[in-house]
Image: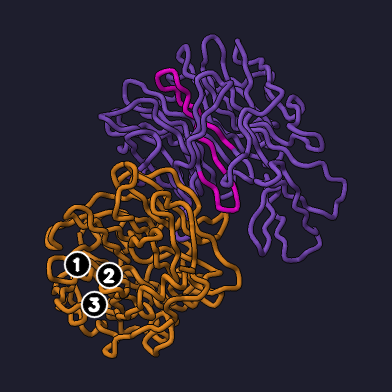
Chain colours: A purple, B orange
Amino acid sequence: MPVFRCPDNPIITPADVRPSSPGFEVVGVFNAGVARHGDQVILLLRVAERPICDDPGVAVAPVYDLTTRQIELLRFDRGDSKLDLSDPRIITTADGTFLTSISHLRVARSTDGLNFQIDPEPALAAVAAYETFGIEDPRITPVDGVYYITYVAVSRHGVATALASTRDFEAFDRHGIVFCPENKDVVLLPDCINGFWYALHRPASPFSARNEIWIARSPDLLCWGGHRPLLGLRRGLWDGARIGAGAVPFEIEQGWVEVYHGADANGRYCLGAVLLDSTHPWRVLARTDEPILAPQAPYETSGFFGNVVFTCGLLVEQARLRVYYGAADTSVCYAEIPLADVVGGLGF
Amino acid sequence: MPVFRCPDNPIITPADVRPSSPGFEVVGVFNAGVARHGDQVILLLRVAERPICDDPGVAVAPVYDLTTRQIELLRFDRGDSKLDLSDPRIITTADGTFLTSISHLRVARSTDGLNFQIDPEPALAAVAAYETFGIEDPRITPVDGVYYITYVAVSRHGVATALASTRDFEAFDRHGIVFCPENKDVVLLPDCINGFWYALHRPASPFSARNEIWIARSPDLLCWGGHRPLLGLRRGLWDGARIGAGAVPFEIEQGWVEVYHGADANGRYCLGAVLLDSTHPWRVLARTDEPILAPQAPYETSGFFGNVVFTCGLLVEQARLRVYYGAADTSVCYAEIPLADVVGGLGF
């Protein structure tokens, strides 16, 4: 599939983002939600920070403290044989799992969609008991002038998905947890269909260990039910090990197109597309055999967590998918894919 | 706490229940939902069956087949070193987890609450894609003449909770999945409070590995949101390893009483009580330090899965808790606990 990667990729890197507090460094800026707001393209960036730590014998987990209302540091001895530090993102202890970084959401604005001004302060950061390990991976759905933002809320209670909303990307309302643990990769369809809103979501189950996409419906965007398995894994293919919804679905003549991510057994994350029925979105009509975007460029194959392209948002403009995507859990990149090629990949 | 155990315990055993099809044997009848219906006490029994298998070298998983509309048998070689058969309830393979038995729900009726007539046929059995490994652990909440039944639906998609309803325990309506995987131990408060229904639920998260009780709210009993962690584990105590809601909550002067189950690090399951605020049920007011019922009798300490007392339903009548409970994942037992003692255990 012919993909145009921006020659300036990555378009946003950790060096472009001011840390939210002294003593922290930005280690990743990636997985951004995207929306058009007036004549601006808005990115809601996931900014991952970690405390600057000069002691190589110590592993540090930053955790928001509800009492002090600050990020406090939990310190672990790297020599402790009970610690599992094999995944650079997490610290597993006998007492639970912690993250090595804490994420917040930051607004960036652009008129051309390529050159962004990044706010100096977070737009949304951990404040609630269910967010103490940070908030991640926003998706933005515009509905009648309100932008609804689903985001992943991580804490010792698990990985859940919460909802916030804004009209201007200045003031935000929080609406609490909409999908309880363990659930992430939640995207909202932008249209109400026969009285119901629909969400794609990705529950994780210790029993089944399948990371598949489900669909749910809601009368009000806050309460969700009618859960059904929607899209399964394809063993041996690029989306054989885990999948999750990516960007907010957009409508074409044939139905809803969802650009999702899939990982293979080696943990390589690609993007593909699936077509859902216009009025019965729990019906899968088609799915691309091949990825529409795969890690290839050095900034995609190497980084904090390499071999990953992962999108939380795109714009469909001038017959192109303008895809904003996280590369290697490190930076924000931009690519354009002709809509006709995606539709062709779906068999039309 | 003075507990009166029925001298005829267990009041229902596997030998009392006719298998649903030839070639199967009933291995457990336990974890029954309970309701008063007219002058009858109704139990909705969980009946666990497994195929009679004479070959000791074979492990068999019964799975409902959506095409043949029958339970088909998956056979595994017990000599296969990749199989994990350490838990008698499950078969873990490289291709996923299966159950060694398949459960359905069966109605039993009584006028005295102790001697039950058991229907010869299942009331509710696996029919849907999300139920192919069986349906389990019903809880019954009466609302304006309708009995709402939450039950656990198990399949390769995970362990979820679905909703059904009936007016007469003859005809049942199914309402699909209300809590997506992994979630079980869902009980509905029987009253609508300021326009919302409330449910206690127990999500399970690969990330946090904490099995704690959450609360959610709903405008219609079908769609759920506003999820909050409600009740945590107490490390080192009888409810230090995992907890889940048990019976449907009942109201006393001081608030809602929920009889829940807790397991310690050794997998011993007891019952305890927690008190929730009447109009703000997400506020925990009190919790019993000690269990109100613990495995003690031989039928509780030994069986298919020993050292377990587990309730899905009780009646509060004549100042007593009339508790129906599963013993050792094998049989249905009955005990009475003075309400005053439970209230006393909560500090009142």
Provide the residue span drawn in magenta: A136-160
**In x, y percent, where is residue A125?**
63, 35
C-alpha gap between disc 3 and disc 2: 32 Å
Q: Residues within 10 Å of mark 3 (few under 14, many from 20)?
A: some
Q: Are marks 3 and 2 in contact (CB under 8 Å)?
A: no
Q: Residue at x 38, y 76 (%)?
A: B59
Residue B8 is left or right of residue B76, and the answer is left
Are discs 3 and 2 both within one chain? yes
What kind of element bears circle 3? strand
**Residue identified by numbered label 1:** B36
**Residue identified by numbered label 3:** B24
Q: Residue at x 26, y 89 (%)?
A: B8
Q: Are marks 1 and 2 in contact (CB under 8 Å)?
A: yes
What kind of element bears circle 2? strand
Tell me if I can see residue B213 in this picture: yes
Judge whether residue A97 is colored magenta: no
C-alpha gap between disc 1 and disc 2: 8 Å
Q: Amino acid at mark 3?
A: Phe
Q: Which mark is residue B315?
A: 2
Name the chain letter of the residue that bears numbered label 1: B
**In x, y percent, where is residue A209?**
48, 56
Residue A310 is left or right of residue B261, and the answer is right
**In x, y percent, where is residue B131?**
30, 58
C-alpha gap between disc 3 and disc 1: 31 Å
Q: Is residue B55 above or below residue B165?
A: below
Q: Which callout, 3 or 1, points at the residue further toward the start of the chain?
A: 3
